[in-house]
Image: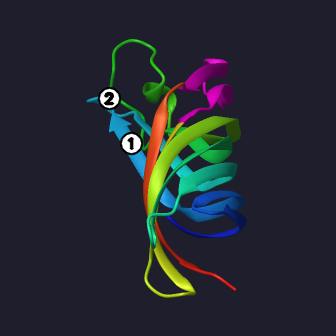
Protein backbone atom coordinates (compact mmCIF):
# COMPACT_ATOMS: atom_id res chain seq x y z
CA UNK A 1 0.00 0.00 0.00
CA UNK A 2 1.10 3.57 -0.59
CA UNK A 3 0.00 6.60 1.37
CA UNK A 4 0.82 9.81 3.15
CA UNK A 5 0.69 11.36 6.59
CA UNK A 6 0.39 14.73 8.29
CA UNK A 7 1.42 15.48 11.83
CA UNK A 8 2.76 17.93 14.35
CA UNK A 9 5.31 17.45 17.14
CA UNK A 10 6.11 19.41 20.29
CA UNK A 11 9.52 19.00 21.88
CA UNK A 12 10.14 19.54 25.60
CA UNK A 13 13.88 19.02 26.13
CA UNK A 14 14.40 15.50 24.78
CA UNK A 15 10.76 14.39 25.14
CA UNK A 16 8.71 14.61 21.92
CA UNK A 17 4.90 14.51 21.91
CA UNK A 18 2.82 14.72 18.78
CA UNK A 19 -0.23 13.77 16.76
CA UNK A 20 -0.46 12.37 13.26
CA UNK A 21 -3.02 11.18 10.74
CA UNK A 22 -2.34 8.97 7.76
CA UNK A 23 -4.13 7.26 4.90
CA UNK A 24 -2.99 4.49 2.56
CA UNK A 25 -4.46 3.10 -0.67
CA UNK A 26 -3.70 -0.09 -2.52
CA UNK A 27 -4.83 -3.57 -3.46
CA UNK A 28 -3.84 -6.15 -0.84
CA UNK A 29 -5.60 -9.35 -1.99
CA UNK A 30 -6.04 -12.87 -0.67
CA UNK A 31 -8.20 -15.81 -1.72
CA UNK A 32 -9.04 -19.37 -0.72
CA UNK A 33 -10.31 -22.04 -3.08
CA UNK A 34 -12.50 -24.72 -1.50
CA UNK A 35 -10.96 -27.53 -3.57
CA UNK A 36 -13.87 -27.65 -5.99
CA UNK A 37 -15.40 -24.61 -7.62
CA UNK A 38 -15.93 -21.92 -4.98
CA UNK A 39 -13.39 -19.17 -4.41
CA UNK A 40 -13.58 -16.88 -1.37
CA UNK A 41 -11.66 -13.64 -1.69
CA UNK A 42 -10.82 -10.51 0.24
CA UNK A 43 -9.27 -7.21 -0.82
CA UNK A 44 -8.00 -4.44 1.47
CA UNK A 45 -8.20 -1.14 -0.44
CA UNK A 46 -7.84 1.64 2.16
CA UNK A 47 -6.42 2.06 5.64
CA UNK A 48 -5.92 5.06 7.91
CA UNK A 49 -5.09 6.12 11.46
CA UNK A 50 -5.34 9.12 13.76
CA UNK A 51 -2.86 8.73 16.62
CA UNK A 52 -0.91 10.42 19.32
CA UNK A 53 2.73 9.54 19.92
CA UNK A 54 5.31 10.01 22.65
CA UNK A 55 9.03 9.60 22.11
CA UNK A 56 12.48 10.39 23.42
CA UNK A 57 15.14 12.07 21.23
CA UNK A 58 18.59 10.45 21.43
CA UNK A 59 20.36 13.03 19.22
CA UNK A 60 18.50 12.24 16.00
CA UNK A 61 17.25 8.75 16.86
CA UNK A 62 13.81 8.69 18.46
CA UNK A 63 12.02 5.55 19.65
CA UNK A 64 8.33 6.18 20.36
CA UNK A 65 5.05 4.65 21.42
CA UNK A 66 1.78 5.48 19.70
CA UNK A 67 -1.95 4.89 20.19
CA UNK A 68 -5.20 5.99 18.61
CA UNK A 69 -7.91 5.03 16.13
CA UNK A 70 -7.53 2.92 12.96
CA UNK A 71 -9.92 2.06 10.14
CA UNK A 72 -9.76 0.00 6.97
CA UNK A 73 -11.96 -0.80 3.99
CA UNK A 74 -12.31 -4.51 3.15
CA UNK A 75 -14.15 -6.14 0.25
CA UNK A 76 -15.16 -9.80 0.73
CA UNK A 77 -16.72 -12.04 -1.88
CA UNK A 78 -17.44 -15.46 -3.32
CA UNK A 79 -17.15 -16.62 -6.89
CA UNK A 80 -18.34 -19.71 -8.72
CA UNK A 81 -16.99 -19.55 -12.29
CA UNK A 82 -19.35 -22.22 -13.71
CA UNK A 83 -21.98 -24.70 -12.63
CA UNK A 84 -20.49 -27.73 -10.86
CA UNK A 85 -21.56 -31.28 -11.83
CA UNK A 86 -22.64 -32.43 -8.34
CA UNK A 87 -25.48 -34.93 -7.89
CA UNK A 88 -27.03 -32.91 -5.05
CA UNK A 89 -28.02 -29.24 -4.94
CA UNK A 90 -25.03 -27.13 -3.88
CA UNK A 91 -24.14 -23.49 -4.31
CA UNK A 92 -22.21 -24.04 -7.55
CA UNK A 93 -24.42 -26.48 -9.42
CA UNK A 94 -27.10 -23.84 -9.75
CA UNK A 95 -24.93 -21.73 -12.05
CA UNK A 96 -22.27 -19.09 -12.23
CA UNK A 97 -22.16 -16.18 -9.76
CA UNK A 98 -19.86 -13.51 -8.36
CA UNK A 99 -20.97 -11.63 -5.22
CA UNK A 100 -19.05 -9.08 -3.16
CA UNK A 101 -19.69 -6.68 -0.32
CA UNK A 102 -17.52 -3.88 1.10
CA UNK A 103 -17.41 -2.90 4.78
CA UNK A 104 -15.44 -0.42 6.88
CA UNK A 105 -13.83 -1.73 10.06
CA UNK A 106 -12.66 0.61 12.83
CA UNK A 107 -11.23 0.38 16.31
CA UNK A 108 -8.23 1.10 18.49
CA UNK A 109 -4.57 0.73 17.60
CA UNK A 110 -1.41 0.75 19.69
CA UNK A 111 2.20 0.28 18.72
CA UNK A 112 5.70 1.59 18.61
CA UNK A 113 8.43 2.59 16.26
CA UNK A 114 11.56 4.61 15.71
CA UNK A 115 12.45 7.64 13.63
CA UNK A 116 15.96 8.58 12.50
CA UNK A 117 16.85 12.12 11.36
CA UNK A 118 18.80 12.12 8.08
CA UNK A 119 19.05 15.93 8.10
CA UNK A 120 17.24 18.89 9.63
CA UNK A 121 14.19 18.30 7.40
CA UNK A 122 14.29 14.59 6.37
CA UNK A 123 13.85 11.45 8.49
CA UNK A 124 13.25 7.71 8.08
CA UNK A 125 10.56 5.98 10.12
CA UNK A 126 9.54 2.41 10.88
CA UNK A 127 6.68 1.24 13.08
CA UNK A 128 4.46 -1.69 14.01
CA UNK A 129 0.82 -1.13 14.92
CA UNK A 130 -1.43 -3.69 16.60
CA UNK A 131 -5.19 -3.19 16.28
CA UNK A 132 -8.57 -4.58 17.21
CA UNK A 133 -11.05 -3.56 14.52
CA UNK A 134 -13.94 -5.71 15.64
CA UNK A 135 -16.43 -7.72 13.59
CA UNK A 136 -18.55 -6.88 10.55
CA UNK A 137 -21.37 -8.78 8.85
CA UNK A 138 -21.27 -9.33 5.08
CA UNK A 139 -24.51 -10.17 3.26
CA UNK A 140 -24.95 -11.50 -0.25
CA UNK A 141 -27.73 -13.07 -2.29
CA UNK A 142 -26.75 -16.48 -3.69
CA UNK A 143 -28.69 -18.56 -6.22
CA UNK A 144 -31.09 -21.05 -4.53
CA UNK A 145 -29.89 -20.13 -1.00
CA UNK A 146 -31.09 -16.52 -1.01
CA UNK A 147 -29.58 -14.00 1.41
CA UNK A 148 -26.50 -15.34 3.24
CA UNK A 149 -24.66 -13.49 6.02
CA UNK A 150 -21.05 -14.12 7.01
CA UNK A 151 -19.11 -12.61 9.92
CA UNK A 152 -15.53 -11.38 9.49
CA UNK A 153 -13.41 -10.66 12.57
CA UNK A 154 -10.36 -8.45 12.74
CA UNK A 155 -9.84 -9.03 16.47
CA UNK A 156 -6.07 -8.70 16.51
CA UNK A 157 -4.12 -7.71 13.45
CA UNK A 158 -0.87 -5.90 12.92
CA UNK A 159 0.69 -3.62 10.34
CA UNK A 160 4.42 -3.11 9.85
CA UNK A 161 5.40 -0.12 7.74
CA UNK A 162 8.20 2.24 6.83
CA UNK A 163 8.20 5.80 5.64
CA UNK A 164 10.11 8.94 4.78
CA UNK A 165 9.14 12.22 6.48
CA UNK A 166 9.78 15.82 5.48
CA UNK A 167 9.55 18.51 8.17
CA UNK A 168 8.64 22.10 7.29
Q: Nearer the viewer, residue 57 or 138?
A: 57
Residue at 45% over, 73% down: 60
146 on left or right of 83: right
| Quadrant hosting residue 11 | bottom right
Q: Which of 3 and 167 is in front in this view?
A: 167
Residue 40 circle label: none
Residue at 45% over, 14% down: 89
Marks 1 and 2: CB-CB under 8 Å? no
| Quadrant hosting residue 23 | bottom right
Q: Nearer the viewer, residue 97 or 54?
A: 54
Residue 144 x %, y %: 61, 20
Residue identified by numbered label 1: 31
By secondary structure, the bulk of the magenta-drawn segment is best described as strand
- Neighbourhood count class around disc 1 (C-alpha, 10 Å): few under 14, some 14–19, many 20 upward: few
Name the element at disc 1: strand
Let me know if residue 119 appears in the view.
yes
Residue at 46% over, 47% down: 159
The nearer-to-camera label among 1 and 2 is 1
Which quarter of the figure is the C terminus placed in? bottom right
Residue 40 x %, y %: 44, 36
- Neighbourhood count class around disc 2 (C-alpha, 10 Å): few under 14, some 14–19, many 20 upward: few
**Number of marks in the rendered image:** 2
Residue at 33% over, 20% down: 86
Would you place residue 84 above or below residue 118 in this image?
Answer: above
Q: Give the range drawn in magenta.
A: 131-154
Residue 94 x %, y %: 51, 27
**Residue most extreme to the top:** 88
Q: Which of 43 and 22 is in front in this view?
A: 22
**Residue most extreme to the left:** 35
46 on left or right of 117: right
Residue identified by numbered label 2: 34
Q: Does the magenta stretch include residue 105?
A: no
Amino acid sequence: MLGGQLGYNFQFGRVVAGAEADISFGQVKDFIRDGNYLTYNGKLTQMGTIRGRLGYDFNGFMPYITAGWMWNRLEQGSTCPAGAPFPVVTVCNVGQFNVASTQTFSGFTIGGGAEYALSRNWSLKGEVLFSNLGKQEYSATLPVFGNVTTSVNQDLSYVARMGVNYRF
